[in-house]
Amino acid sequence: MTDAVKKIMSHYTSDNPGTRANLVRMLSHGRLGGTGKLVILPVDQGFEHGPARSFGMNPPAYDPFYHAELAIDAGCNAYAAPLGFIEAVAGRYAGELPLILKLNNHDSLSDERDPIPAQTGSVADALRLGCVAIGYTIYPGSVMWREMYEQLRELAEEAKACGLAVVVWSYPRGSTLSKEGETAIDVIAYAAQLACQLGAHIVKVKLPAEHIEQDAARKVYEGQKIAIKTQAERVKHVVQSAFDGKRIVIFSGGSKVTDEQMFGEVRSIRQGGGFGSIIGRNSFQRPRDHAIKFLHTVMDIYSGAIE
Amino acid sequence: MTDAVKKIMSHYTSDNPGTRANLVRMLSHGRLGGTGKLVILPVDQGFEHGPARSFGMNPPAYDPFYHAELAIDAGCNAYAAPLGFIEAVAGRYAGELPLILKLNNHDSLSDERDPIPAQTGSVADALRLGCVAIGYTIYPGSVMWREMYEQLRELAEEAKACGLAVVVWSYPRGSTLSKEGETAIDVIAYAAQLACQLGAHIVKVKLPAEHIEQDAARKVYEGQKIAIKTQAERVKHVVQSAFDGKRIVIFSGGSKVTDEQMFGEVRSIRQGGGFGSIIGRNSFQRPRDHAIKFLHTVMDIYSGAIE
Amino acid sequence: MTDAVKKIMSHYTSDNPGTRANLVRMLSHGRLGGTGKLVILPVDQGFEHGPARSFGMNPPAYDPFYHAELAIDAGCNAYAAPLGFIEAVAGRYAGELPLILKLNNHDSLSDERDPIPAQTGSVADALRLGCVAIGYTIYPGSVMWREMYEQLRELAEEAKACGLAVVVWSYPRGSTLSKEGETAIDVIAYAAQLACQLGAHIVKVKLPAEHIEQDAARKVYEGQKIAIKTQAERVKHVVQSAFDGKRIVIFSGGSKVTDEQMFGEVRSIRQGGGFGSIIGRNSFQRPRDHAIKFLHTVMDIYSGAIE
Amino acid sequence: MTDAVKKIMSHYTSDNPGTRANLVRMLSHGRLGGTGKLVILPVDQGFEHGPARSFGMNPPAYDPFYHAELAIDAGCNAYAAPLGFIEAVAGRYAGELPLILKLNNHDSLSDERDPIPAQTGSVADALRLGCVAIGYTIYPGSVMWREMYEQLRELAEEAKACGLAVVVWSYPRGSTLSKEGETAIDVIAYAAQLACQLGAHIVKVKLPAEHIEQDAARKVYEGQKIAIKTQAERVKHVVQSAFDGKRIVIFSGGSKVTDEQMFGEVRSIRQGGGFGSIIGRNSFQRPRDHAIKFLHTVMDIYSGAIE
Amino acid sequence: MTDAVKKIMSHYTSDNPGTRANLVRMLSHGRLGGTGKLVILPVDQGFEHGPARSFGMNPPAYDPFYHAELAIDAGCNAYAAPLGFIEAVAGRYAGELPLILKLNNHDSLSDERDPIPAQTGSVADALRLGCVAIGYTIYPGSVMWREMYEQLRELAEEAKACGLAVVVWSYPRGSTLSKEGETAIDVIAYAAQLACQLGAHIVKVKLPAEHIEQDAARKVYEGQKIAIKTQAERVKHVVQSAFDGKRIVIFSGGSKVTDEQMFGEVRSIRQGGGFGSIIGRNSFQRPRDHAIKFLHTVMDIYSGAIE
């Protein structure tokens, strides 16, 4: 095991060896294996946004095999998807790729102000399908927050007893937040903290903007002169908020941007001490060859192979 | 096993041999056995619409034996119905016909804007009655979507462990959708995707119309010039949205139309690469002899025996 | 076994011998034993309407022994009541009379627009009390329909596994229906169909009136010229709607009427092919001797002993 | 369904439709499908006798695929084997062949005088592997008989609730019997009766010899002049002892004999009214082409296609 | 995945993706990863023979860390041990090495003629410790065989449902066998067959000697002229007996021999088509540097890197 992985794993000593082994599997797999950095391919957009909006710009991506092969060929650390997409590939690519079964999902037919996803998979599914982790989305700020936190708690407890890791998508959203507030630096930092406190091993948040949502928070950010001007500074603050870097926090690629924009973001994440990216649409909405080259560049920035 | 069936089965490698055997049973039964195409007879209208509206135009159809015999004599791949209708025939026709027990149903006494069916059967019922699959209806777009998805998840997990297949009726409906939206191409494609992501082996949707419901989707359909002008093009898009043809997607016959209209639809489904039809009212609301001739023609179009 | 009973039993071939034996017990007991007709004495009015409204006009009927003896002496096929009344007599008259334990009941202190009864007994109670069947009331048309259908499903599954029969009281009621709609011919026929689809062996409905409640149904009744003018025609239509006579459907006597009115109704039920009556208030609110004579006449009309 | 199958199924009316469907599946499959006769391929000799003694004379038979393909190509009604052999083929040949999972097996390393097999599979295994039936061996005459009968009872109860059929190998053996007694006509007839009384749907016994083992029995055989001189007479008596032909009783092929010997036995079984054969060693110890021709002849004798 | 691994995995299509993934993990790990060959380090001698007899000749081997590091540094495919040794290393080396938890063990304080090990770990232990497989020892030939086979059956069913693989140590031993019989070719081949029939994914047996133990078997070996003169021929016969090479069969190194003796054995195993070795004492009783060089040579013979 590399020193980078060893250092990360030294923060997970309360977990049983099964969970630790699955974390190591993700950290050791693919092009970034052993660097302590992660690039995960998530494909839940078919469920969350509908097929055409997700795959229409790159039709081979309608095929579930496409994504497993993209993750393998690009050397991603893991592939995350809802039950159907995982069932479609788990048998065929068994043992070739760490899989994360997303246990809850939300569709966009009902665009609720205070969303709560439906549970769409179980820990038993994750075991029979050979996954290394469960994934779960919480929406801090939704009036339904308690239901989500409590369902996560139950599933995480069960997953940990079985030696699985727990990856939490922490996306602030709901009637208590302004639209801008969903990516406000104070709110994203808070969302990272919440996921860690709920027992996540890996946390996924959006890249934060400079906006501050909560008045009570603003006083501290200003009073303490917390640096949040640059993206790297904000990433650094989020990493700090995720148990001072003692929990793996990765950032979502978000909606499609140019290669250069994404490379810039990745450099900021690296500079700020982030652990990596979870890049869905920016991976599978590019043509395959482009996507692989693009992901390799992202990985090489993380590994330091290029600047 | 024919090559057509083998190819379909190669997409279900995560399932246990029991579930795979039951899928093969359906694909191998009846006049279309071995062609990779399916025509299923569903009779849940007695529950869903009431007896007179369902059977009044062809009174022999009040009799549950009538439907089992129609399915056998016409050579359908399977017969799907709620508990009562299946109990009425499972003993008498045991082993003569693959049965699908519909585990939830909704009546039309309460015409809710946001419907959710009641669970009316169980996996244990399906086993004791000798069924090859469970059926379940979801209404994407209903504010009750979460309850349905979660109940489906539980029942599907149990069914799969027992070697049963899972057939999902995915019918968009609810206050988030316009009436036109229920058969909009973007919504139907989404409904197919959702059922697949929820772990369905076979998905049933309505034939989509050219209408696009969601603004976010319209941009992609127009921007990517996704072909949706003809029925065949729309079917092709739905098949693509059902894991690029790696899940069996079949189309409902809908309310009663003329023979020629239905044959036209079937030709479009065949052209678009659809796997078949699930034809209820257009089967049992025709006089028996007519219905059998009609279903044979439908099947022969699917098999390519006629144009 | 008589041919009449054999014919009826030939429609229950999916049930286990225990359930079939209990159906045969009811069909073979009492004055109508072997005729294929049934007259059941139900006494849930004490629970449903209160004691004085139920028994005040014939005070011996306050006594639970009274009803068991009435059922025995009149030669009823079975006696149905809530837990307390059954517990009061099951030991004393053990083996003398088929008992049906009504598993849910509603009181009239809370006169809800959308009623749902409370579960007041269990399958285990039915077994320990030596009952041949469970009884259960559903209110199609209540916004609480789903809860009732799902509770019935669970109880019926358990009862059938234990060899009990399932009798469903299907009483349309609730905010989706007009008062007239509760006995509308389309609604009663639908209620009979629903109970059968939910797996009932015996269905009890009210005698339908000529009114049609649902517009969608009216089109069919008028278009198909479904005969519903006379009571006998309406009964015939309800029997048809109960799986074309392949499920036992009996009619409730309703509130108290004169002997002649009731005999007229019974003649209509016989003419329409109904399987019998379930007569509560018209039995126990008459003085005992009168009641027995009255019930004998009803039975004799059913058996054809008199016109 | 053919009349022959209908007649057989009329004897299994206490079973649920699931079990009946699986019996029909076996009776309808393969070259003898619909004739009411069965030829089953059993391959438990690898477990029972060791690999070389079982497969050494026809080395391709070491391969588990070989047997599934032999059963398919020869048109056997079903294939029976222990867990490992079934697991090796259930996924690959899913849906192509009715499978019987033998739930207990005995090896020949410990040549016990009073044998009892070990349970080596479960009903849950049978379901996940898509089997139509469980198989179970009892050794009437072993001092361990009670343990076997009781384990069979539990497994059969569970199997029947899940809609599986129960096939019992009834092999008299143990310290209470002489070697000759294991195939004595009184003992084999008794063994058939015992399996039926224990709830078997299909019983497998050895062909009986003329020897009578039990003095108490001899008196009746002689006193009543029960005909047991010819093989056909003895088969007829065994069929009579298996509920007078109301349970399916088939005969094991036993150790390897010549084609003509086996054809003679099969003619006797047919003459005596037996339902068929379960032929292991005489199938898979012949070279494949020979075996298929041999099995076709056996089947054609049963179907009456040849004498 | 390499073609060699793909070919092996094509024989495990009845298993769920979790189990398949764990088999692939073992086949892909270490110096032999991808070759289709396996060298596993087992260290249960501390339990089975006592510490001094096991580790006294190489005292660093008293330390559980020693063995995990030896397996890692030598590039073994997996490390197998009882609960204590696995618990001692699972946390420290999490994710670095596929672990096999041996679920039963026998000490040598009670040197029973008919041994049966004690269950010393559980499937839940295997999951929490991050193991890829459970291990289980059976002693065919022991009068306690039934207890072992049945316990294995239960544990294997549970393990497979959780996505774990099942490794069976099949060691003939007991009062029905002579000492020579424990490694007789007929008995070892039988032991391999039994483990496969009991549902093992990987079978471990001792290298067979030319001796034939059972008279019934001798007839076949001689009659069929089964080649068992050379070690390679005997290995080939055992591989054949393990489902004709469709189950992974590996051979134990046994008591300590010279390097050259072991290399000779390994060449025979390779020649005979064996899948590899499980080498305990010959690994950890050599000094560490020697052991690593020794194991590398063994692996290089398997991979064909050297002759």
Image (tube, coloured by chain):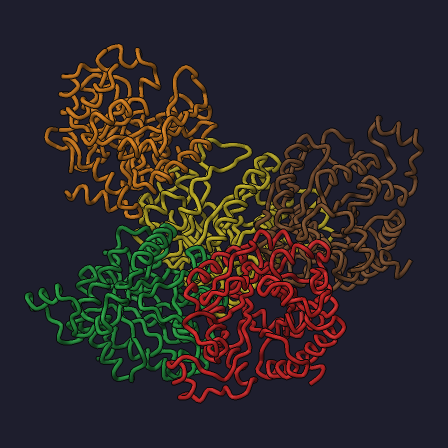
Chain colours: A brown, B yellow, C orange, D green, E red
* Left or right relative to A184: residue D123: left
Tell me the residue at 67%/69% (across/down). E1
Q: Nearer the viewer, residue E241 or D268?
A: E241
**Percent coordinates x, y for residue C202 in the rendering:** 29, 35
Against E243, residue A265 (above or below) is above
Question: Which percent across, then down, holds residue A3?
Answer: 83, 57
Q: Is residue C284 visible?
A: yes
Q: In the rendered view, tell whether residue C27 sits above or below residue E114.
A: above
Residue B272 visible: no
- Report whether A235 appears left or right of D114: right
Residue in the foreground of this view, choosing between C218 and D118: D118
Q: Residue at x 62, y 54 (%)?
A: A85
Quadrant of residue A306 in the image? bottom right
> Foreground residue, A41 or D180?
D180
Where in the figure is residue D56, as x and y percent of width and height? 43, 82
Residue plotted at (54% across, 70% down): E203
